Image: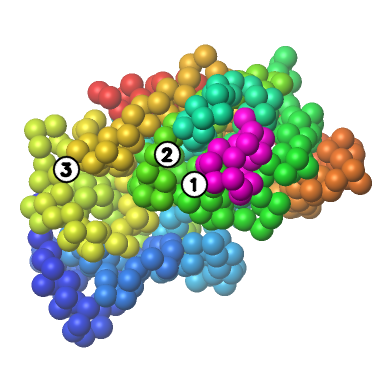
Amino acid sequence: MKRKFKKITTIGLTAMLAGAVFITGCSGSNNAQSQPQEEGSKRASISTTLYDRGKVPPEAGTIDNNLWTKWLNDNGPVDVKFVPFPRSEQVQKLNLLFASGDAPDVIFEYDGGFFNQLYAQKQLLPLDDLIAEHSTSYKQLTEKYPQLLTLGQQDDGKTYLFGRILGAKNNDFIFIRKDWLDKLKLDVPQTTEELFQVAKAFREQDPDGNNQKDTFGINIGGPSAESVVNSMFNNASRFVEDGKLVNPNIGEQAQAAAEFQKALFDEGVVDKDFLTDKNGEKAKQDWVTGKLGIYLGSSGVDNAGLLEEYKSLRKNVPDAVIMPIELPEGPFGRFNPGFKSPIQMTGAINKNATDPVAIMKYIDFLVEEDTIMALKNGVEGEHYTKDSEGLATPIDAEKNQKDLVGILDLSILSSIGVLPKAEQVTLKLDTSIPEEKDFETFLKLADEAYFNPDNEYAYPITNWPGLPPELQIILKNTETISEMWKKSIVGGSKYSPEQTLKEVQELWNRSGGQEIDQFYGDWIANNPDNVIYNRDFINNINEQSAE
């Protein structure tokens, strides 16, 4: 369904910010007149969550009152009140609002576990009848991608979640300084033991040639690096082996991952303060300043932030040569790391929402191609033009950089995977710029490395069910297991990973963790036809997106 959108000019934005206060979603006459209504009809109002990452500059407004929240209200079918939450606090604050009955109508969230919790608490509205009877665009999307309904279902067989089609994209990655390998006459590491030896050489053999021991071999701080290491040792997710479900986090896989990191720590190969680098920012600075040889990260290679990091590295170290590499083979095999799911479930409706039909109209609007393009590239004719393949080309890159702020999480339901193939990439590279031409190569190498059909997937299953409330309590009571493994890395001879494994298993069993393992094991055994394995899932979705 195509829709003609109004053009919003920069003058309009300036007036909006400088004039009278505009509160998105309130019953102002500007919103009421922005979309023609049938005679006698009243424009509906809804409320939705919106992450606040603190990245909207004052001159662009606020996260809930800017060019793009206004655009959605001007061009959409309903008035929307955007309710902002700090990114790291949304779940916590929404729990309080649900408890008081004041949560927004629509919940947009990346945390599938939180949706499972809301379902268990009976806070979500079933969507099957709403989609069947009142949807157009989203219903058509589910007809082409029925996995949307499967992944949106809970154990009662009803659909509770809305999702988006992304196509499979890499997420976790390893970058290595190829120029350091060449200088030290080292090969690309193929095993975790070789990775350790290369990292050690990068620390001890002065690869940057400044006659100081000021380089780190590899980073292990923050959840991104932790995820990559766990994937190398098959410690990322439960898996089926010899017909039985294995929980690696309380087994030999977790011990091996800890021993690898402990050796790096004890040998001084990594930053001794890695535990304080909770978000990986210190590792990023070491990387861009040329002081880190092997960079473990996430958010995908097709990422503007990683491109900017590479440009910073090349500015600081013009001769730096880097490349993405496959995860080295560990004692349990070789694995493809964590990736961005081809389908991501990101939306739900509060069961107490007063106008679900109006919400469905808004969801339909969000999943239309024209809306997706606008929330990705701006307004056609003002911010971009399209070529014959449907690829958007910026008209004025500097203007777009100023205008396209506050837009990221408004596109949380955007199905990038349904756009023309040329437009499905996140990065728009200008290959006349040497660093961006390099990145074109990195993108290809990364997909070959991290979707290698010869490797198993560290995250083999997509659609794990949510835990019932009583098992969620058990899981919460075992949250310290992660910290116990970290303690074993820095604990020296007094606290070894072998000892930690015994203590972890004792805590798991004492807390009733076997009940969680039994729950997942029973689900695998009782639902063999409903388990979605990522190897098949990725191939299937990519084929559909290419049509």
Mark 2 or 3, closer to the camera: 2
Front residue of 477 and 120: 477
**Residues rendered magenta in the picture:** 198-217
Quadrant in the picture for the N terminus: top left
Left or right of residue 69: residue 214 = right
Question: Measuring 64% from the left and 33% from the top, which residue is drawn there?
Answer: 201
Against 444, is 21 above or below?
below
Tell me the crowding category of disc 2: few under 14, some 14 to 19, or many 20 or more residues within 10 angstroms, Cα based.
some
Residue of label 2: 320
- Indicate the secondary structure of the residue bearing disc 1: loop
Q: Quadrant of residue 143?
A: top left
Instruction: Assess disc 3: are there few (<14), some (14-19) or many (≥20) residues with their C-alpha within 10 Å of its C-alpha.
Output: many
The residue under the point 28% across, 24% down is 546
| For discs 3 and 1, the disc positioned in front in the rendered view | 1
Query: Taking 20 as reference, is 248 above or below it?
Result: above
Percent x, y of residue 370: 18, 47
Q: Earlier in the sequence, mark 2 or mark 3?
A: 2
**20 and 393: which is toward the camera:** 393
Where is the C terminus found, in terms of image quarters?
A: top left
**Residue 368's x, y, as percent?**
23, 45
Q: Amino acid at mark 2?
A: Ala
Disc on res. 290: 1
Asked whether the beta carbons under mark 3 and mark 1 sit within 8 Å of each other, the answer is: no
